[in-house]
Amino acid sequence: MPDDIFEHPRLAAIYDALDPDRSDLEPYVGMVAEFDAVDVVDLGCGTGVLALLIAAQGARVVGVDPASASLGVARAKDGAAAVRWLHGDAAVIPERSADLVLMTGNAAQAIVDEAEWLATLAHVHAGLRPGGRFVLETRVPEARGWEQWTENESRTTTEVEGTGPVESWVALTDVALPLVSFRWTFVFHRDGQVLTSDSTLRFRGETDVRRQLDRTGFEVDDIRDAPDRPGRELVVVARRR
């Protein structure tokens, strides 16, 4: 089930306002041209920011997400008609339909069950044309990024149009590697409502990711630094064998 931060209608509606600088997505838009991709799948598309950026460049884009509230936000945006939005997981990707599948942010790590993760990789493999590429992000466990996930470091207040000030912060709830759990808290100052969203991520190292991709029919072409978290997160570029 999607976390409340993506599925609760009120939280999905403010998601973009709380993270307005999406310059980290520019390298992924560039990959469409780099890999001569015509048909692109944004797997875990959320509120559709990346999918819409890619569609604006002329590619045919499918946005896939299990959170109906986030998809509702995406479908209401300008230019949304240029994207085919699908509610679900990797299983809904049409067979051999894509040149490039992107899985950015925490989308890959949010699949914490390893059997489910291997099934996801198999579905992505089936959805790609031969030679097509799968790009995913994975946080480097050795960087111990969760140590910065504290209330003091993350507390902020954002003025959201039509909603008023929203205060938010994140705090760890459990570290049992490779799993790390945390809770976001949101305070809507205009009416006093407090909402929380609990999440768990699986920290997979490069060795594990390479092994899992090989097992499901991929060959790793490249390992890059994540644009917004150099040294702390990897961008894995794999090719469908």
Image (cartoon, grey):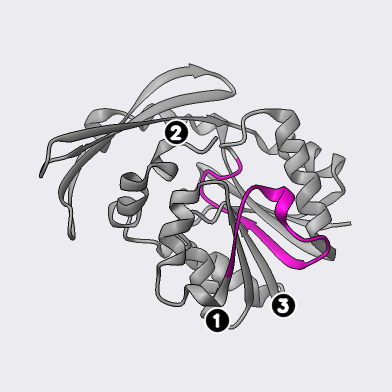
- The magenta-colored residue range is 84-108
- Which residue is more in the foreground, 204 or 195? 195
Instruction: Residue lying at the far bottom in this picture: please name it.
Output: 58
Which quarter of the figure is the C terminus placed in? bottom right
The amino acid sitting under disc 3 is Asp
Badge 3 density bin: few <14, some 14–19, many ≥20, Cα 10 Å: few
Query: Cα distance, mark 1 to mark 3?
Result: 12 Å
- Return the disc, 1 or 3, that comes first in the chain's sequence: 3
Is residue 131 placed above or below 178 in the rendered structure? below
Work out whether 12 lies above or below 114: below
On the rendered structure, is 169 left or right of 225?
Answer: left
Q: What residue type is labelled 1?
A: Gln
Q: Report helix, strand or loop for mark 3.
A: loop
Label drawn at residue 136: none
Residue in view at x 37 percent, y 49 percent: 12
Name the residue beneath numbered marker 1.
Answer: 57
Q: Position of residue 143 (x, y in %)?
A: 50, 33
Which picture quadrant has residue 109?
top right
Q: Residues within 10 Å of mark 1 (few under 14, many from 20)?
A: few
Q: What element carries label 1?
A: loop
Q: Identify residue type, mark 2.
A: Gly
* Cβ atoms under marks 1 and 3 closer than 8 Å: no
* Badge nearest the viewer, 2 or 3: 3
Q: If you read the primary sequence from the N terminus, does the residue marked by circle 2 or circle 1 appear first?
A: 1
Q: Residue 36 carries which label?
A: 3
Question: Left of 54 or right of it: where is 122?
Answer: right
Say whether marks 2 and 3 touch (CB < 8 Å): no
Mark 2, residue position: 145
